[in-house]
Image (cartoon, rainbow, N blue to C red):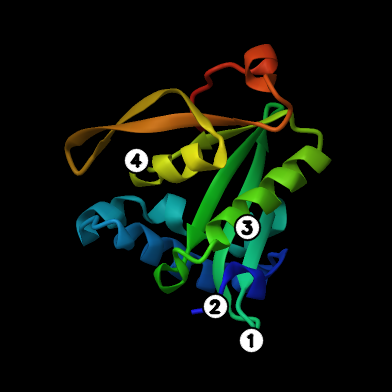
Amino acid sequence: MSRSDTFEIRDGVPADAGRLTQIAYAAKAHWGYDPATIDQWAGPLTVTEDYISSNRVFVACDGSGYPVGFSSLLWDQGRCELDHMWVDPPHMGLGLGRRLFEHAVREAARAGAKWVWILSDPFAEGFYRHMGAFRIGDWPTVVTGERRIIPVMAYDIEPGAYDRYGRVDQPR
């Protein structure tokens, strides 16, 4: 595989929806979740044409233009949320996740965000911590009858912004 600097990041287009959904499912499965559990997340993992048309979606493509990762931002009641952040498993470990995250943060800053809210998969918490995000709370949920705690994180674009402007909100 190539290093992350050989990938291009572009805005998502509705025609990307099917491939982005494939990436989200493959990345989630990479963490060892069983198919029944992944099926419970069908709604949140499915990227539709309408979703892409209505939100900021950033697609990482390999040298041939084929999508291999993506991220997206949502604005909800003035809060900027990193809604999706997925890298196709064969391209993990190449720095592509870092590039996608940094790109999303730059775009959030351009849009006026002071900090970014992240509802993290427990397996991704270490990545977000490495990127400079910090845990601000827990979101309890039940998946396949099992109680789980999902990390709620924040990333300060402006140093100290979460402490000045943030609040622990419930996910959508």
Residue at position x 41%, y 41% in the image: 126
Q: Give above or below for 155 relative to 107.
A: above
Q: Is residue 55 visible?
A: no
Measured Cα–Cα span from mark 4 to mark 1: 32 Å
Q: Quadrant of residue 98?
A: bottom right
Q: Secondary structure at mark 2?
A: loop
The kind of residue tagged 2 is Ser
In the rendered view, does 59 fall on the left or right side of 158? left
| Label 1 crowd (10 A; few <14 / some 14-19 / many >=20) | few
Residue 64: mark in rendering: 1
Q: Quadrant of residue 88?
A: bottom left
Measured Cα–Cα span from mark 2 to mark 4: 27 Å
The kind of residue tagged 1 is Ser
Mark nearer the N terminus (3 vs 1): 1
Q: Which residue is mark 4?
A: 122
In the rendered view, does 159 fall on the left or right side of 132? right
The kind of residue tagged 4 is Pro
Q: Which residue is mark 3?
A: 99
Residue at position x 69%, y 21% in the image: 161
Q: Position of residue 58 (x, y in %)?
A: 67, 60
Label 3 with label 1: CB-CB less than 8 Å = no
The kind of residue tagged 3 is Arg
| Label 3 crowd (10 A; few <14 / some 14-19 / many >=20) | some
Mark nearer the N terminus (2 vs 3): 2
